[in-house]
Amino acid sequence: MKNTKRLKPGEYNSKLMSDLMLSAKGPHRTGAKFCEECGISTATFSRFVNGHNVKPCTKEFLRKVADHAAPESGVTFERLLAANGGEGSLGNNSMPPLSDNETIGLITASILQHHYQCQRSAEQENTNILGLSYHPSWSVNTTAINGKSIKKWDFLFWRQYSKSENIEADRMIRQLLIIISAVNLGYLVFDRLTFVFTNPVLYQVIVDRVKDLQLDMDISLLLIDITQRELKEEYFIHCKTGAQTSLLTIDSEFPQSESTLLSIDEHNSI
């Protein structure tokens, strides 16, 4: 049986409401930006966050917060309603979002358990191309790309700002095309770039969008299961240069099971 906490109707919980508000904002938006997107005042948001609000708010207010909550936060209208003193369940969806350090740990563990060399790359400055500021979430020098020599592998941990997967997929594709252009023009240099996602629906939408692309560089998509805290699936965009860059067809001496991030052990976990 699932252990689901339930609040009594009329029992307003200011501490829980504060936690939910902060989670809904997410780590990558300012309070002002979140309030602007929700259509609520910063003063009202501040009262909730600081625990100064002592009485329930309107359902309209809760709906605005729920509709603009960070997708990885697990904050729903029902959970807000429960904290507000109304009928509702806090639910079982309380898994915190994956931190950058956790993401790096999962990827590093995978590389090292394949017995590849792995060293963090030197800090890279922002590169501005056509209005896009490119700065990898993490970059590593490793032999994992071709199983032989040290190569530079960049990772971009995708931050989802819209609840619409189609809007997010459009944004990702635009960034991808700009990055491809920047590499071809010599502004960016990497041996592999991997976009990392935690939303499986968004991941699949993007896979469907890029499946017909043919690139002359090594770019992949990686899905991480935030519930199990494990690498779940990876997809390699078709690469024209084949064996020199793709983990899928790397070399006859290094079969796919030896060069993909996903075949560490039974659970793909640290």
Image (cartoon, rainbow, N blue to C red):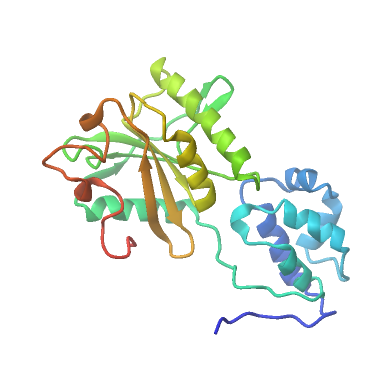
Give the total of numbered labels: 0
Farthest residue, direction top? 185
Residue 54 lies in what quarter of the image? Answer: bottom right
In the figure, 134 relative to 38: above or below?
above
In the figure, 153 relative to 4: above or below?
above
Asked if one can make out residue 102 in the rendered structure from this viewpoint, the answer is: yes
The location of residue 245, given as percent across then percent down, is 26, 32
The location of residue 127, given as percent across then percent down, is 49, 25
Residue at image coords 73%, 68%:
78
Does residue 258 appear to the left or right of 268 in the view shown?
left
Q: Nearer the viewer, residue 262 or 31?
A: 262
Q: Nearer the viewer, residue 115 or 267?
A: 267
Residue at image coords 68%, 73%:
90
Asked if one can make out residue 105 in the rendered structure from this viewpoint, the answer is: no
The location of residue 181, given as percent across then percent down, is 45, 19
Residue at image coords 50%, 52%:
200
Say which quadrant the N terminus sits in. Answer: bottom right
Does residue 18 appear to the left or right of 109 in the view shown?
right
Q: Nearer the viewer, residue 233 or 139?
A: 233
Residue 161 lies in what quarter of the image? Answer: top right
Say which quadrant the C terminus sits in. Answer: bottom left
The location of residue 81, given as percent across then percent down, is 78, 69
Does residue 254 appear to the left or right of 235 in the view shown?
left
Farthest residue, direction left? 253
